[in-house]
């Protein structure tokens, strides 16, 4: 069992048949430029409509020159929390942690400990995947009815930061029809998990959020 402690604020989204996203670039100075820094969390229905996909992006604003050297930290666990009864507490978790050149996944399962502290139940292993390298073909794995990916990706988040700052300063009334993507040309490290809906309970909607937690 591995005991962990939260070292980063969370991103919260709700799922009710639509794709919803949460983004958090730059504004977490305590963990900026580390494996604990979550930039985006996406949850959406898979190409197979019986599945949901959870995508967690970390370590934003990686330039092409620095991406190859970026890596997941073996002491930092990524945890997707799933509330399927509306009480805003995790009923299920999916956990991912690196060991060597692979990412290992556990769950979804009901955690024995909830909140800021977590443990990994090693008996709940659901699969693992070789971590893809920058510039190489993406490596995926399918195990126990789930699909996994871990590695660098182009940052999918689009935001015109310059225009946003102009709006705050009163220099612009709103966003432009065609904005300038501040994050163009930058990369993130991504963990992607595709899960059969049947593994997540029978609720019509889910609340889900993601945390990074450091092993103590």
Image: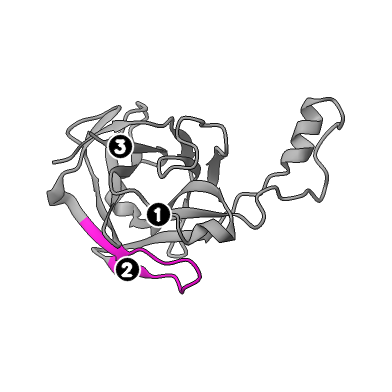
Mark count? 3
Please state which of residues 144 and 59 is positioned toward the viewer in this rendering: 59
User: Circle 2 sits on which residue?
Assistant: 141
Which residue is at a point 47% across and 38% down the rendered structure image?
A: 14
Foreground label between 3 and 2: 3
Which residue is at a point 46% across and 34% down the rendered structure image?
A: 12
Q: Are the residues at dot 1 and dot 2 in contact (C-beta closer than 8 Å)? A: no
Specify which label sits upstream in the sequence, 1 or 3: 1
Q: Please rate how many residues cluster around mark 3, counting C-alpha atoms within 10 Å: few if below 14, some from 14 to 19, many from 20.
A: many
Please state which of residues 121 and 108 is positioned toward the viewer in this rendering: 121
Helix, strand or loop at mark 3? strand
Q: CA distance from mark 3 to mark 2?
A: 25 Å
Q: CA distance from mark 1 to mark 3?
A: 15 Å
- In the figure, is residue 136 to the left or right of 24? left
User: Circle 1 sits on which residue?
Assistant: 71
Which residue is at a point 58% across and 60% down the rendered structure image?
A: 64
Q: Verify whether residue 130 appears in magenta.
A: yes
Residue 130 coordinates in the image, percent (x, y): 32, 66
- In the figure, is residue 45 to the left or right of 125? right
Q: CA distance from mark 1 to mark 2?
A: 19 Å
Quadrant in which residue 126 is drawn: bottom left
Residue 155 coordinates in the image, percent (x, y): 57, 54
Which residue is at a point 72% across and 40% down the rendered structure image?
A: 161
Its colouring scheme is: one colour
- In the figure, is residue 3 to the left or right of 45? left
Specify which label sits upstream in the sequence, 3 or 2: 2
Question: Residue 214: which numbered mark, if any?
Answer: 3
The residue range painted magenta reads: 126-142
Q: Verify whether residue 75 appears in magenta.
A: no
Helix, strand or loop at mark 2? strand
Specify which label sits upstream in the sequence, 1 or 2: 1
């Amino acid at each position: 069992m591995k005991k962990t402690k939260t070292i980063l604020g969370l991103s919260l989204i709700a799922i009710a048949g639509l794709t919803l996203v949460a983004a958090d670039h730059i504004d977490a100075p305590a963990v900026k430029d580390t494996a604990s820094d979550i930039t985006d969390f996406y949850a959406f229905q898979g190409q197979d409509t019986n599945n949901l996909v959870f995508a967690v992006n970390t370590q934003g604003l990686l330039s092409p020159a620095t991406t190859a050297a970026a890596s997941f930290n073996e002491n930092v666990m990524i945890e997707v929390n799933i509330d399927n009864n509306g009480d805003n507490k995790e009923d299920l978790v999916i956990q991912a942690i690196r060991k060597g050149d692979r990412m290992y996944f556990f769950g979804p399962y009901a955690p024995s400990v909830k909140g800021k502290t977590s443990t990994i139940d090693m008996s709940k292993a659901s699969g693992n995947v070789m971590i893809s390298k920058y510039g190489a073909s993406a490596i995926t794995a399918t195990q126990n009815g789930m699909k996994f990916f871990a590695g660098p990706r182009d940052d999918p988040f689009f935001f015109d930061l310059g225009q946003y700052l102009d709006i705050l300063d009163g220099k612009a009334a709103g966003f432009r029809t065609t904005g300038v993507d501040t994050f163009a040309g930058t990369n993130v490290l991504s963990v992607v998990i595709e899960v059969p809906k049947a593994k997540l309970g029978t609720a019509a909607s889910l609340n889900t959020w993601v945390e990074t937690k450091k092993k103590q």
